[in-house]
Image (cartoon, rainbow, N blue to C red):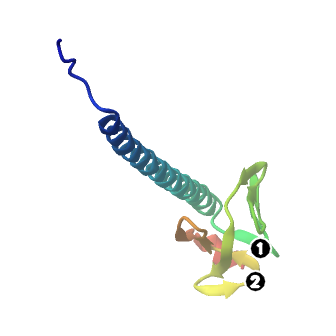
Amino acid sequence: MNKVKAFTLSEILVVMIISTIVISLAFTVLNMVQKQVKVIKKSIDIKENIQSLERVIWKDFNQFGYGELEGNRLQFKNPIDSVVYSIHNDVIIRDADSIFLVPLSYTFYLDKEVKKQGSVDAIKINFSNPYTSFDLFVFGKKDASFYLNY
């Protein structure tokens, strides 16, 4: 009689247990990597939004020179155009655009002095969330006519 070469039941069980452990470890590592990628993506999205906000505020400060502050409302205006920012607890609104960033704190300045009302030429906004912490400081250069009319 010819003997058939085969694995025993106990050998197959050992291989199945080892392969189950290896596959479960692989899925666990994959899950951890996917969570890290989501956190990194969220952090990058927030930083891109902050950089976009910085560019827009910088453009407005340098186009208009200074803004008028009334409470949480900042208005830039000249004879041709105007832009209004409203800073709320969960969103920053620029005219019809909503920027979904949560400012932790914000401070307005005029010639390096903190202002609560009136003309401002700089803003500092602190953003803090579980993914990142970031300070944004934007200022504009005023021309001589500002000081003549001030």
Depth check: give the residue in front, 98 or 22. Answer: 22
Compared to residue 132, the image places residue 15 above or below, namely above
* Disc 1 residue crowd, few under 14, some 14–19, many 20+, Cα 10 Å: some
In the image, what residue type sits under mark 1? Leu
Image quadrant in which you'd find residue 142: bottom right
**Residue found farthest to the bottom:** 113
Q: Which label's residue is closer to the chain start, 1 or 2?
A: 1
Residue picked out by circle 2: 116
**Looking at the picture, which amino acid does disc 2 mark?**
Lys
User: What SS does tag 1 mark?
Assistant: strand
Tag 1–tag 2 contact (CB < 8 Å)? yes
- Image x and y of residue 92, in percent: 73, 61
The tally of labels here is 2
Horizontal side of 128 relative to 35 (left or right) equals right
Q: Quadrant of residue 140?
A: bottom right
The front one of 1 and 69 is 1
Would you place residue 139 above or below residue 31 in this image?
Answer: below
Residue 82 position within the rendered picture, expressed as x and y whole percent measured from the top left = 76, 55
Q: Residue furthest right?
A: 71
In this view, the residue farthest toward the top is 1
Instruction: Name the image quarter holding the N terminus.
Output: top left
- Residue at point 55%, 52% (across, down): 45
Residue 144 circle label: none
Q: Residues within 10 Å of mark 2 (few under 14, many from 20)?
A: some
Q: Residue furthest front?
A: 1
Query: Is 140 situated above or below 47?
Result: below
Q: Look at 47% across and 50% down and name the residue there.
A: 37
At horizontal 77% and vertical 73% (from top left) the residue drawn is 69
Q: Which residue is mark 1?
A: 69
